[in-house]
Image (spheres, rainbow, N blue to C red):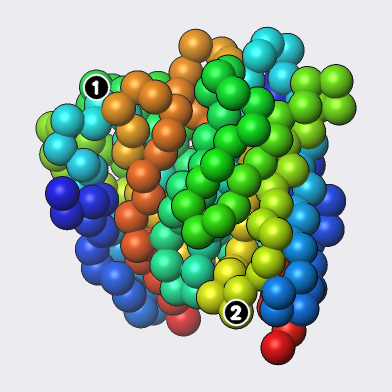
């Protein structure tokens, strides 16, 4: 069965610093991978997705993620954090049992220090 | 496009009462998902539909929970009777066969 592990339930960085949120997945077949962001009191919003095209995926708000098959990783990065990036981030992998389900990680809360 | 619409946005009810949450997916999407989010358990998939047919309800916590999708533009999640441990944010999401799910704003349920 597919699974997602997000390393670190809480990450804190200074404004202007690099943001790195870690995600490792397990999948028996080439997966589709996603990062979602959830701002307070809102639903989840898609940041970016990997669907077996380019391994470096660019998303909204300056975020990007790199698919590394050898490391089974899909880490999310942003070169320079902004206060507005404070939110919870979820990594997700496609379920492969012929369904459209996504398997979500537990989430990482990102805090930006001024 | 209006996105996924959920109602009500907030619901406060007493233990034992029936609660009905509503969802209108994005027009043209053929799959709909109900999730529950709590601090303790994170984001949990309760049930999902494909072409209005329930495909996997293994996440539904118990018989007090039921979900229906009578047509392509409407779904309900019902809890009867409600209990304090059902307090959570319930999200509806839809997709058009691409895995990419679009989430609604959620319904915050408080059962006292």
- Residue visible at 62% across and 46% down in the picture: A64
Pick the residue in front: B54 or A45.
Answer: A45
Instruction: For mark 1, name the chain.
Output: B
Q: Relative to residue B25, is residue A106 depicted above or below?
A: below
Secondary structure at numbered mark 2: helix
Q: Residue furthest bottom?
A: A114
Q: Quadrant of the N terminus of chain A?
A: top right
Drawn side of residue B46 relative to residue B18, left or right:
right
Q: Position of residue A50 (x, y in %)?
A: 57, 29
Q: Residues within 10 Å of mark 1 (few under 14, many from 20)?
A: few
Asked if one can make out residue B78 in the rendered structure from this viewpoint, the answer is no
Instruction: For mark 2, name the chain.
Output: A
Drawn side of residue B18 relative to residue A93, left or right:
left
Pick the residue in front: A82 or B32.
Answer: A82
Q: Relative to residue B92, is residue B106 depicted above or below?
A: below
Q: Position of residue B83 (x, y in %)?
A: 49, 67
Q: Quadrant of the C terminus of chain A?
A: bottom right
- Residue visible at 35% across and 22% down in the picture: B97
Q: Position of residue B16 (x, y in %)?
A: 39, 69
The answer to which quarter of the image holds residue A81 is bottom right
Asked if one can make out residue A96 in the rendered structure from this viewpoint, the answer is yes
Where does label 1 land, which residue? Answer: B51
């Amino acid at each position: 069965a597919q699974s997602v592990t997000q390393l670190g339930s809480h990450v804190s960085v200074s404004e202007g610093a690099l943001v790195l949120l870690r995600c490792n997945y397990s999948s028996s077949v080439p997966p589709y991978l996603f990062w979602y962001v959830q701002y307070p009191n809102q639903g989840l919003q898609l940041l970016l997705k990997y669907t077996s095209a380019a391994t470096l995926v660019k998303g909204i708000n300056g975020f990007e993620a790199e698919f590394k098959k050898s490391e089974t990783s899909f880490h999310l990065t942003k070169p320079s954090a902004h206060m507005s990036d404070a939110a919870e981030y979820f990594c997700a992998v496609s379920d492969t049992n012929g369904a459209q389900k996504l398997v979500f990680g537990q989430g990482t809360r990102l805090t930006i220090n001024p | 496009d209006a996105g996924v619409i959920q109602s009500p946005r907030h619901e406060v009810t007493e233990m034992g009462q029936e609660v009905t949450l509503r969802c209108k997916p994005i027009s043209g999407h053929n799959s709909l998902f109900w999730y529950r989010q709590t601090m303790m358990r994170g984001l949990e998939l309760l049930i999902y539909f494909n072409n209005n047919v329930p495909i996997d309800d293994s996440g539904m916590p118990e018989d007090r929970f039921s979900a229906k999708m009578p047509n392509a533009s409407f779904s309900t999640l019902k809890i009867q009777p409600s209990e304090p441990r059902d307090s959570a944010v319930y999200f509806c999401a839809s997709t058009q066969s691409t895995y990419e799910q679009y989430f609604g704003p959620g319904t915050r349920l408080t059962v006292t």
